[in-house]
């Protein structure tokens, strides 16, 4: 099935640094979502974006819905050790039968002290 | 709120046996449940979508006779892996979507079930 491209694939950063990752698609989505997955766990929703151009924050996290509806980015400010994990973007089409999620390839984040 | 549970969290079985995985929405009614499979270091891949009381819709390449899905109530969906083989070993994750706090389209994920077939 289709997957969204995320970059970078992985990153090592020091505690306190800011992190930026993005997600691109060849298709238009009406909703963009960002999830974090810890090892052996299911994904947890971080931020949901519903309008093109929308910029939304959740604590140290900020995400934007690209104006073309084909991309999104996620920023994490002042990273801390518990930010370690895999971050997935997901795009969702219209409601109803087309409302299933298409996941990105993931960005693995590792934070060093 | 919006808690989704899965049972069991881990299961080891012999090749050729069948395994049932349960997915429950604990504090909301899930009109739709989704089943995903995730191989190590890979993303989540949707296997099937199920609506309460109707047959599941399977994604291309997923064998419906091998992965039986039953969504008998608004809070429970089950995935049965029939005649499991080692290549079916994976992390199976369900998600549920329904009316909760006015957000009708948000999917909430379960903690996953690690299946190992020997």
Image (cartoon, coloured by chain):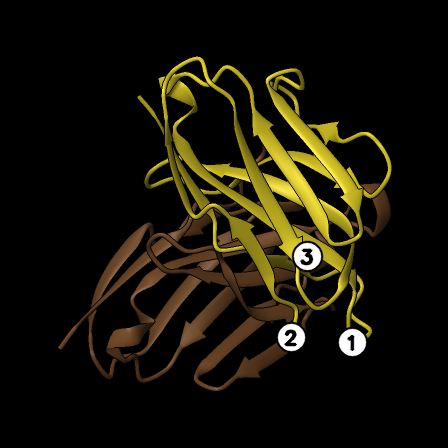
Chain colours: A brown, B yellow
- Residue drawn 43% across and 23% down? B88
Give the label, 2 or 3, closer to the camera. Answer: 2
Q: Which residue is mark 2?
A: B1
Closer to the eye: label 1 or 2: 2
Which quarter of the rendered picture does the N terminus of chain B lie within?
bottom right
Query: How many marks do you count on the picture?
Result: 3
**Distance from the alpha carbon under mark 1 to that under mark 2:** 9 Å
Q: Is residue A93 above or below residue A13?
A: above
Whether residue A107 can be seen here: yes
Q: Are marks 3 and 1 on the same chain?
A: no
Viewed as shown, does residue A56 lie left or right of A29? left
Q: Which residue is mark 1?
A: B101
Report the chain holding disc 2.
B
Ranked by sequence position, the earlier of labels 1 and 2 is 2
- Residue B28 in the image: state x and y as whole percent: 75, 65
**Residue A69 x/y as whole percent:** 68, 57
Quick check: A73 above or below A105? Answer: below
> Is mark 1 in CB contact (under 8 Å) with mark 2?
yes
The x, y position of residue B114, in whole percent, is 40, 40
Helix, strand or loop at mark 3? loop
Q: CA distance from mark 2 to mark 3?
A: 30 Å
Write down the quadrant of residue A45 in the picture.
Answer: bottom right
On residue A69, which mark appears?
Answer: 3
Vertical comparison of B16 with A99: above or below? above
Q: CA distance from mark 3 to mark 1?
A: 26 Å
Image point 54% across, 63% down: which residue? A34
Q: Residue at x 29, y 67 (%)?
A: A84
Quadrant for the C terminus of chain B in the image: top left
């Amino acid at each position: 099935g289709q997957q969204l491209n995320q970059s970078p694939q992985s990153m090592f950063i020091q505690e306190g640094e800011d992190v930026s990752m993005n997600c691109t698609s060849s298709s238009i989505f009406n909703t963009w979502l960002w999830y974090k997955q810890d090892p052996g766990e299911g994904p947890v929703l971080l931020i949901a974006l519903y309008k093109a151009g929308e910029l939304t924050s959740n604590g140290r996290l900020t995400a934007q819905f690209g104006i073309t509806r084909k991309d999104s980015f996620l920023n994490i400010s002042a990273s801390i050790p518990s930010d370690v994990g895999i971050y997935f973007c997901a795009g969702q089409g219209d409601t109803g039968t087309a409302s299933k999620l298409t996941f990105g390839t993931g960005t693995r984040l590792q934070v060093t002290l | 709120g919006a808690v989704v549970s899965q049972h069991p969290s881990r299961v080891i079985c012999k090749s050729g046996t069948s395994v049932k995985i349960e997915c429950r929405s604990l504090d909301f009614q899930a009109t739709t449940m989704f089943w995903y499979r995730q191989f190590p270091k890979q993303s989540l891949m949707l296997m099937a979508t199920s609506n309460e009381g109707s047959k599941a819709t399977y994604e291309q390449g997923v064998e419906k006779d091998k992965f039986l899905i039953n969504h008998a109530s608004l809070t429970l969906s089950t995935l049965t892996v029939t005649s499991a083989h080692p290549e079916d070993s994976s992390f199976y994750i369900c998600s549920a979507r329904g009316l909760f706090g006015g957000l009708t389209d948000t999917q909430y994920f379960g903690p996953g079930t690690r299946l190992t077939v020997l």
